[in-house]
Image (spheres, rainbow, N blue to C red):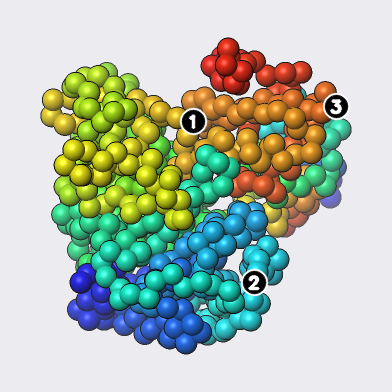
Amino acid sequence: MPTDRPATAEISSIVKDFILDRFLPGEDPANLTDETPLITGGVLDSISTVTLVAFLEQRFGVQFQAHEMSADYLDSTSAIAATVTDKLGS
Amino acid sequence: MRTLSSVFAESARRFPNNTAVADPTRGSRLSYRELDSISDHIRDALVGGGVRQGDRVGLYAAKSCGSVASVLAILKAGAAYVPVDYAAPAERNAFIFNDCDVAAVMVDRNLVGKLVDAFEPPNTVTTEVGHAADLGVDLVIVWNAVTRHVERSTVGDDSLSYILYTSGSTGKPKGVMHTHSSALSFVDWCSRTFDPLETDRFSSHASFHFDLSILDLYVPLKHGAAIVLIGEDVGKNPSVLAPLIAESGITMWYSTPSILRLLSEAGKLEQHDYSGLRVVNFAGEVFPLKHLRAIKSAWPDPRYFNLYGPTETNVCTYFEVPVEIAEDRTEPYPIGFACSGDRVVAANDDGTKVPVGEPGELFVSGGSVMSGYWNLADRTASAFYIDENGVKWYRTGDIVVGDTDGCYAFVGRRDRMVKRRGYRIELGEIEAALYRHENVSEVAVVALPDEENGVRITAFLCTNDGKAIGLIAMKRYCSGMLPLYMIPDSFNYSEYLPKTSTDKIDYQTLLQSA
């Protein structure tokens, strides 16, 4: 069945653009890799994590549970993309 | 003799079957009888292992029924508890435990490795606490083999009950010492002001290392009411927090304004029933009026109180927000009137009162004021002004303006201390951390009010090689040195920092360019 769900790589790219725009103004985009630690690396604090999750929920039409708003699920753009892909597929 | 633990013991005797503490996230709860019994068990383990009256015992765990039992156990042992932010860098917490020379630390088993790696000289011998299912957490005791016991006297109301570490200007946190008497002075004021009932259910939103927790824990425990624990992860997630407040039947809410703002903006509050909520307290930072209007619109029925006070004084002034906020009002509400038991004045450096309507530093004296900073005699001495009658006044460093009724409005900080997300931050501590970066040669940190985040922190840096360090790299570096709320929002690089005529960093010029 055809689907218009975004691919994981596309999600990762959208998330990177959002993080660079909102939380890392002026940063060289090349420094934000798929594996850059976001929460454990001090890029996202509790408030910016809430902002990011609100963006993900709105942009991709997914819902996050309380326990998912943590470094286990959101600590890198690859982890975020995987989490969102997982939700879109379920 | 009244102590925090004797007040709890009285409630345990009067209300054995009432819920003392509930943890809705973990699905655990303890009655007063159970909490009494479990905290006795932990006290016995502490005393059996060598904890003596007057000792300090650390608490290094997330909030849980077990954490509450641990706090009571430490108090029952006649020791003072020292709670830390378990999410902060291990080095910072190790500094705290070493600084106040804890006899032992109550630790979540999952955090033992993190603790002993940094805490020197540790004795990695641990004692099981047990009761894991009831406590909602697996606690163990890590012993410090080299503790020097400094007091062995009988516990009295002037004995230390807890030490809360706050950001220090030297780059090291400093321990604010409260006695049973100073804690109870505040708790008793709460009793008179909020009329707690045994049927009340108090939110415990703040972490235990935060001074808001004193109201959260001891006011309900004094009155046979319930503490409703709100886990650190849930506490900042409005879509989970909003239904939790309704479903757990919270009647007394207490948090920073930031959380109330999150709830009104993203909590979908209209979907839940908050008819039981009767008091909303907020403290820790200025509540912008537009955000206060928003939460009052969603929750119109409770009484709202602005509580003010640095960790050193507990709450020392309060202001009850009117039922109707005037439409043309734009200013935040004042910090208000002195709590009974405390006296406040706006004063000059030399302790003379400033006239009504003129700005002065807020001085506080009375029952709720700290006894001093742990192991910092000079810092303690300089924190107080002693008047001609020998009365000790704590210098808050906050500039206020008083009116003829004795109501005070907050103007700003006297020094470079700022509050962000309710946490007090000494900008000097951030500078000290940045100075430790191998490529940083000079640094100055400034903070400016920010509509979105309350406070925006900017670091100005010079580097040895003259090149800028990437934002991600700097944030990552800081995350290993500082709690997340202290990490600067932006980093600006230049060849040199502007200086005053006395060759000190010119912060005024930096503020203008931040």
Read off the residue under disc 3.
B465
The quadrant of the picture occupied by the C terminus of chain B is top right
Relative to B394, does residue B127 appear above or below in the rendering? below
Q: Nearer the viewer, residue B446 or A10?
A: B446
Chain letter belonging to callout 2: B
Q: Is residue A4 left or right of residue B286?
A: right
Mark 3 is on which residue type? Asp
- The answer to which image quadrant residue B391 occupies is top left
The image position of residue B225, as x and y in percent, is 27, 67
Q: Which mark is residue B416?
A: 1
Query: Among all residues in the image, which is located at the extreme top?
Result: B501
Chain letter belonging to callout 3: B
Q: Is residue B100 visible?
A: yes
Mark 1 is on which residue type? Arg
**Callout 2 and callout 1 share a chain:** yes
Mark 2 is on which residue type? Pro
- The answer to which image quadrant residue B364 occupies is top left
Read off the residue under disc 2.
B122
Name the residue: 65% across, 56% down.
Answer: B91
- SS state under label 1: loop
Say which label, 2 or 1, has the lower sequence index.
Answer: 2
Q: Is residue B222 left or right of residue B39?
A: left
Relative to B158, does residue B427 appear above or below in the rendering? above
The image position of residue A4, as x and y in percent, is 79, 41
Chain letter belonging to callout 1: B
Q: Are marks 2 and 1 in contact (CB under 8 Å)?
A: no
Q: CA distance from mark 2 to mark 1?
A: 35 Å
Q: Residues within 10 Å of mark 2 (few under 14, many from 20)?
A: some
Q: CA distance from mark 3 to mark 1?
A: 29 Å
The image position of residue B425, as x and y in percent, is 51, 39
